[in-house]
Amino acid sequence: MRHWFYTDTAGRLESAGLVLLRLVVGAAFLFHGWPKIQHPFGWMGPEATMPGVLQMLAALAEFGGGFLLILGLLTRLASLGIAGVMLVALATYHLPQGHPFVAMTGPSFELAAVYLACAVLFLLLGPGRFSLDAVVFRKPLGSGLG
């Protein structure tokens, strides 16, 4: 189970890149999620077809996931929630509306796709060495356990 939370596969340079990406993406989701977490069951408005409990899960994934990414704590779990929110945004909003990948004006699904790609990257690589996951879940030296 420990391997799911942290694997020591990234070197120092790669870990520096991961921490930079975690800070930027985490801060973005913290700010995206802040207004939603204020009204977690109804941030989409009264006309929304999305059930309140799913709105709450999305708000929690964005705000809480952003906070956890910044800390590098439970990074893969946070990334799983963020990836789920981005997949739902793509499948229920951007693609049915026919939004292009990139648009000079008007809506596009570029940002949702980039956030999804970042979440998948964190799922595959983990948080890197400079994270609380490394401190909490790193296999103790000389231990065959883990």
Image: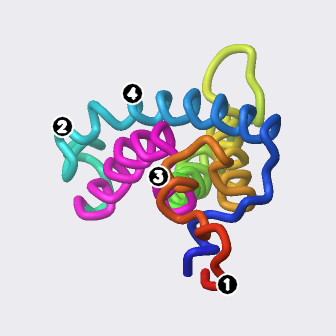
Instruction: Give left or right: position of 38 versus 63.
Output: left
Residue 38 on image: x %, y % = 18, 37
Q: Determine whether the residue tagged by mark 1 lies in a helix, strand or loop.
A: loop
Q: Residues within 10 Å of mark 4 (few under 14, many from 20)?
A: some
Crowd band around label 1 with a 10 angstrom C-alpha radius: few (<14), some (14–19), many (20+): few
Residue 68's x, y, as percent? 43, 46
Residue extending farthest to the front is 142
Residue at 50% x, 36% y: name it: 26
- What residue lies at 36% left-to-right and 37% top-to-bottom? 33
Q: Spot the residue most to the top.
A: 105
Q: Earlier in the sequence, mark 3 or mark 4?
A: 4
Q: In 3D space, how far apart are the residues under numbered discs 3 and 4 (Cα atoms)? A: 18 Å
Quarter containing the C terminus: bottom right
Kindly identify which numbered label has been placed on residue 31: 4
Q: Quadrant of the N terminus?
A: bottom right
Q: Do the CB atoms of the residues marked 4 and 2 lie less than 8 Å apart?
A: no
| Residue of label 2 | 38
Nearest-to-viewer mark from 1 and 2: 1
Q: Position of residue 60 (x, y in %)?
A: 32, 51
Name the element at disc 4.
helix
Front in this rendered view, residue 112 or 98: 112
State which tag comes first along the sequence, 3 or 2: 2
Q: Residues within 10 Å of mark 3 (few under 14, many from 20)?
A: many
- Type of the residue with mark 3: Leu
The amino acid sitting under disc 4 is Phe
> Which label lies toward us, 3 or 4?
3
The residue under label 3 is 73
- The residues colored magenta run 52-78
Which is the main secondary structure of the residues drawn in magenta? Answer: helix
Residue 60 part of the magenta segment: yes
| Residue at the limit of the structure toward the bottom, as seen here | 145
The residue at which mark 1 appears reads as: 144
